[in-house]
Image (cartoon, rainbow, N blue to C red):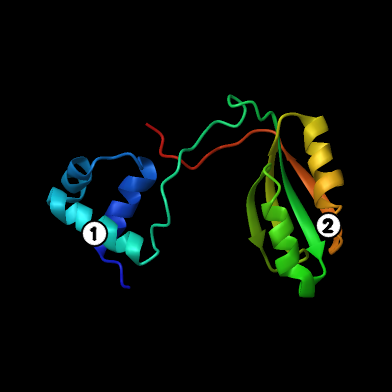
């Protein structure tokens, strides 16, 4: 499916505020409410919009320790590793990447002790994980628009 300028504008508005009403959405991208609704439905049906989410401040929501963790894994077992990683609730994001390591994780935990538990007792306990490297996040800068 080719995205036109209106589709891209709709996506941008929804990235800023996924709760925007169809009326507001239509006004911002200069189409009718019905037109906005039809386009959002088409974008969802095509799998371009996969869902709507809420962003939270990890620290204010009780997650005081965050880290990116890179993994080297036995590549033939990648799907098994991915399935196991998806079962760990503290893992916010999983990416299969190319380069000096295979997988990049974003982990959010209550504190450093909990972060240590997740990395050493859960992630590294997966048999096909060969090595890991943990990069602590001191402060997050979300890419949300600044008002």
Residue 7: % across, % down:
27, 60
Residue 55 x/y as whole percent: 49, 37
**In front: mark 1 or mark 2?**
2
Residue occupying the point 83% across, 38% down: 116
Query: What label sits on residue 39 in the rendered view?
Result: 1
Q: How would you rate the neighbour count of disc 1 (Cα within 10 Å): few for under 14, some for 14-19, many for 20 or more?
A: some
Give the residue displayed 17% in from the left and 42% down from the top.
23
Residue, disc 2: 126
Cβ atoms at labels 1 and 2 below 8 Å apart: no
Q: In this view, does 20 lie to the left or right of 27?
A: right
Q: Is mark 1 on a helix, strand or loop?
A: helix
**In which image quadrant can residue 79 be found?**
bottom right
Give residue 86's quadrant in the image: bottom right
As drawn, is 127 to the left or to the right of 106? right
The vertical placement of 13 against 76, above or below, is above
Instruction: Choose between 146 and 63: the one closer to the eye.
Output: 63
Let me know if residue 106 appears in the view.
yes
Q: How many neighbours does mark 2 have within 10 angstroms: few (below 14), some (14-19), or many (20 or more)?
A: some
Q: Could you tell me if residue 31 is visible in this image?
A: no
Say which label, 1 or 2, has the lower sequence index. 1
Residue 84 placed where, x, y %? 73, 57
What SS does tag 2 mark? loop
Q: Nearer the viewer, residue 101 or 44?
A: 44
Question: Quick check: 117 left or right of 145?
Answer: right
Residue at 84% from the left image edge and 64% from the top image edge:
128
Q: In which quarter of the image is the N terminus?
A: bottom left
Question: To which quarter of the image does residue 113 belong?
Answer: top right
Q: Nearer the viewer, residue 100 or 63?
A: 63
């Amino acid at each position: 499916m080719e995205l036109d300028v209106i589709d891209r504008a709709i996506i941008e508005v929804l990235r800023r505020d996924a709760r925007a009403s169809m009326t507001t959405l239509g006004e911002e991208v200069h189409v009718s409410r019905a037109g906005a609704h039809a386009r959002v439905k088409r974008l969802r049906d095509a799998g371009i919009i996969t869902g709507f989410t809420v962003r939270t401040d990890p620290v204010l929501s009780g997650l005081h320790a965050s880290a990116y963790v890179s993994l080297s894994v036995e590549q033939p077992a990648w799907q098994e590793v991915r399935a196991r990683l998806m079962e760990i609730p503290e893992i916010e994001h999983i990416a299969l990447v190319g380069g000096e390591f295979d997988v990049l994780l974003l982990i959010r935990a209550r504190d450093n002790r909990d972060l240590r538990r997740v990395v050493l007792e859960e992630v590294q306990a997966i048999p096909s994980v060969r090595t890991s490297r943990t990069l602590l996040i001191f402060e997050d800068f979300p890419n949300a628009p600044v008002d």
